[in-house]
Image (cartoon, coloured by chain):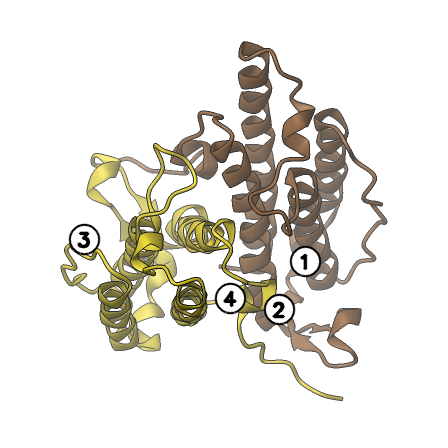
Chain colours: A brown, B yellow
Amino acid sequence: MNHNDAIRLFAKTLGNLERWMDKATAHAKARSFDVDVLAQSRLAPDQYPFVRQVQSACDQAKYAAAYLGGKQAPSHPDTEQTFAELRQRIEKCLGFLESVRPEDLAGGPDRKVAPPWLGGRWLRGDDYLVHLALPNFFFHATMAYAILRHNGVELGKMDYIGSLPTQEG
Amino acid sequence: MNHNDAIRLFAKTLGNLERWMDKATAHAKARSFDVDVLAQSRLAPDQYPFVRQVQSACDQAKYAAAYLGGKQAPSHPDTEQTFAELRQRIEKCLGFLESVRPEDLAGGPDRKVAPPWLGGRWLRGDDYLVHLALPNFFFHATMAYAILRHNGVELGKMDYIGSLPTQEG
């Protein structure tokens, strides 16, 4: 698995997330409640609500693409409150991911990744991808899914996985 | 990221999961309830309980190691009901992951992976890792975490991530 594959996986999963939001919207409509109630739902009182899980998934993907691709991450302030705004946030993130090309990411494994919160320490690009970006991205994507699922939205595993490049013969 | 790194990431995360279970056990003791109540907890009535999330995370790791390492997966029947039994299941899984060596996994990217449920179709090893094994493994690990978190166990993001190979200077 190269770093470009990882970034495309994040992009694919954010696309899947948009479809979970479609199902949530249909569910809210069928039950006659405002879908944006779900934007503020959470699984525990001291855990991020749905809106923040989506913002965090976007940020994990964005920073991974930036750090591993040697690019400056664009600023995306966490101002979203509604499903409509979250969709725009996802689209902005996907646009940035698309702008980071396979050739930018070819140098990813050996880049020195030093997020400010590491306080001066750093990780090799490969270690950053394996130990932080992948687990963190799927943590927030799965939490977003779990919040919708907990609130009755009919999601199944294939909604989570999305399309598969299977081959025949 | 090579396939061996992915299998070691799964092993590391299953080790983290054992520590979430330690915290759950301490939480249950402090509140004077049987920790095995949590083994049957779930986030939605038609979703897997904790016990099945842990079994599934183990299986995702086990089958990834087997398919990508060109090995036969050992049979681990889903008979566990208690935290003590789940710990044994995790240890059996970790033992198998350990037995699949970097040299076995070196051929992973190009192996033909044909799980029975694909009905005769198959995936390249690299596609299997990216599109199925990684998202599925973290799905079940995060759901296990989410079930404990939802039930009041004090877990934070660093419990989820575990140790980091940071470097200095």
Q: Residue placed at 85% from the left, 45% from the top?
A: A77
Q: Are marks 2 and 4 on the same chain?
A: no
Looking at the image, do the residues carrying marks 4 and 3 touch, with CB atoms under 8 Å apart? no
Q: Secondary structure at mark 4?
A: loop
Which residue was labeled with disc 4? B1
- CA neighbours of label 1 inside 10 A, class few (<14), some (14 to 19), many (20+): many
Chain under label 1? A
Looking at the image, do the residues carrying marks 2 and 3 touch, with CB atoms under 8 Å apart? no
Q: Which mark is residue A128?
A: 2
In the image, is residue B152 above or below residue A155? below
Disc 2 versus disc 4: distance between alpha carbons?
10 Å
Asked whether, in this view, residue B1 is left or right of residue A167, the answer is right
Front: mark 1 or 4: 1
Q: Secondary structure at mark 1?
A: helix
Asked whether, in this view, residue A131 is left or right of residue B104, the answer is right
Q: Position of residue A89 (x, y in %)?
A: 75, 36
Which residue was labeled with disc 1? A64
Disc 4 versus disc 3: distance between alpha carbons?
31 Å
The disc, 4 or 3, on the residue closer to the chain's N-terminal end is 4
Asked whether, in this view, residue A166 is left or right of residue B145, the answer is left
What type is the residue that disc 3 sits on? Asp
Q: Position of residue B68 (x, y in %)?
A: 31, 61
What type is the residue that disc 2 sits on? Tyr
- Looking at the rendered image, the quarter that the C terminus of chain B falls into is bottom right
Q: Which mark is residue B20?
A: none
Find residue B33 and report its image quarter: bottom left
Q: Residue placed at 61% from the left, 42% from the top?
A: A11
Q: Residue placed at 29% from the left, 49% from the top?
A: B52
Which residue was labeled with disc 3? B78
